[in-house]
Image: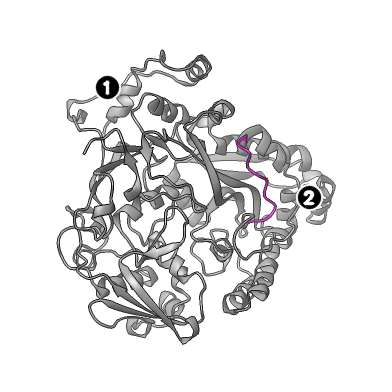
Amino acid sequence: MRAAGTPRWAREELLICFEHLSTPLKIALQGLFVLVSVIVSAGCVRNEPRADVVIVNGADPESIDPAIITALEDYRVVPGLFEGLTRIDPETALPIPGLAERWEISDEGREYVFHLRQGLRWSTGEPLGAEDVVFSWLRLLDPRTAADYAAQLFCVKNGEAFSTNGITDPGKVGIQALDGRRVRVQLNHPVPYFLDLCASPTMAVVPRRVIETHGDRWLQVRPLPSSGSHTLEIWRLNDKLRLRKNPLYWDAANTVNETVEFLPVGSPATALNLYERGVVDIIWDKDLVPSELLGDLKQRRDFHDFPYIGTYFVRFNATHPPFNDPRVRRALALAVDKQRIVERIIRGGEPVAHHLVPTGVANHRAPDGLIQDGVQARKLLVEAGFPQGKGFPVFQYLFDSAAGGGAKVHAKIAVELQEMWRRELGIRMELRQLEKKVYLAAQNGLDYDLSRSSWVGDYNDPNTFLDLFLSNNGNNRTGWKNARYDGLMHQANLEQDARKRSELLRQAESLLVSEEAVVIPLYFYLGFQFYDGNRIQGIHGNILGMSAVRTIRNKAVRK
């Protein structure tokens, strides 16, 4: 992978004609665009054909290695390249057969035997077998990989012990190849969503031989072996990532496009303008259109929304004083007017959130959470030793940057929180904006005080949100460790009675968002997409907010 010069679509952006836009859009966009001069070297000019489907994807993927991905931009690309034993049905978001054509479940749900499809091959022609699956899952657990999602396999026999160096023999982990086409998985306890986990992009099957040969540089190998519906054709940072149909994919007959392209566009104005001009076909996110125009855009026929299990929240670094004091965290949480944020900034109909797990997630009864109460907030700050904010240190709020600067939602929310906490509590917060990859590194390294955060469920169960804050979870990123919370989650994972399990999860969430207030939930997501339904087909809004690349078709492209 290498950085490119100014991408062709960006150069074209500088020569825009607004005449085809409606007058309201034209006026608003003219106020948002700033035309700049760009010097383009001859080596940057490329004459590449347009892909069948072009998608605005926000930032460049941080990685396409399934074991280490964390960002939403990564999650949209990786399933097209690497598939797991199961895959997500794009309409229902339920797990369906992927590389495994069938499976048997025994020992009261503690043992699975997966049967791989006959004749599976990597895109480069080599056989794909059970040993590749075992290697991929053990690699996810291997502490040397440092995968944030390793905890997804802690339910496997000795999975956690192997990941934390409790044992070093991978043969003791409950993942074995019975023969070339069968994989046996032994669990510590029944996991009702285990087949959903098998569809997670982080548990996709990766090429063992290539990784063993090239190590950390395996993604630079060309051609890159793929187990999914597409292969990697182009990845130029700050330019584009293009996938091409994999003719050796087991379901190639039902892959309906030849090429799909993802553009790293962070500016809402640029994204909408490229869409209006037909340079791109799909805008995935509401954040990638100007918020000032959202009211008008929602009335258009190419606007689509759908239920979506995701939460936008603020994360505390519980290791940094004074935020290691739950009273301080609760005070800040109680001082936030979430309704004002939703109505003034978000403006898409999203509901405010007082708990972390979105309403509607299966088998969950949410706690009440903390409701705005300025009087109680100030009282808690007095108890913590900061009456009227006196003596409270200046602190920073971390959020990620993108083109568009202050017009971005993250920045607007940051400014709103800054003012609320100044007005209600008399404390001063500075804003710290970092490029997306640096922002994620700062979160992982606990190099922050407060941080804007979000999470989209990997499967339809409360556990996909609540297990993030286990002491040993790589996605915790708060420094908060709580034995009681860990115990409640452990009990819930072992509990087979659905009602008792729900109560344990409710208690754990109440501890997280109310008693300890490690996070401040702000609002629940709604899914938003822009595409012309008469031309683009195969996009299905589901509760995970993930569309399958293989099903997206552009009717304007003739085969």
At horizontal 45% and vertical 20% (from top left) the residue drawn is 33
Cα distance between the residues tagged 2 and 1: 54 Å
Rendered location of residue 481, percent (x, y):
60, 68
Q: Crowdedness of circle 1 by 10 Å Cα count: few (<14), some, many (20+)? A: few
In the rendered image, which residue does mark 1 sit on? 39
Q: Position of residue 537 (x, y in %)?
A: 37, 41
Q: In the image, residue 259 lies at what x, y percent?
A: 25, 42
- Region of the chain picked out in magenta, as a range: 347-356
Residue located at (22% from left, 78% from top)? 180
Left or right of 267, for residue 263: left
As drawn, the label of residue 440 is: none
Q: Is residue 352 magenta?
A: yes
Q: Which quadrant would the C terminus be assigned to in this image?
A: top left
Q: Report the front residue among 49 and 443.
A: 49
| Lower sequence index among marks 2 and 1 | 1
Q: Quadrant of residue 125?
A: bottom left
Instruction: Work out whether residue 246 can be spotted.
Output: yes
Is there any visible trace of residue 147 in the rendered image? no
Left or right of 319 on screen, residue 30: left
Residue 433: x and y in percent read 52, 39
Residue 386 has which mark?
Answer: 2
Vertical side of 107 occupied by 519: above or below: above
Task: Name the residue type under label 2.
Answer: Phe
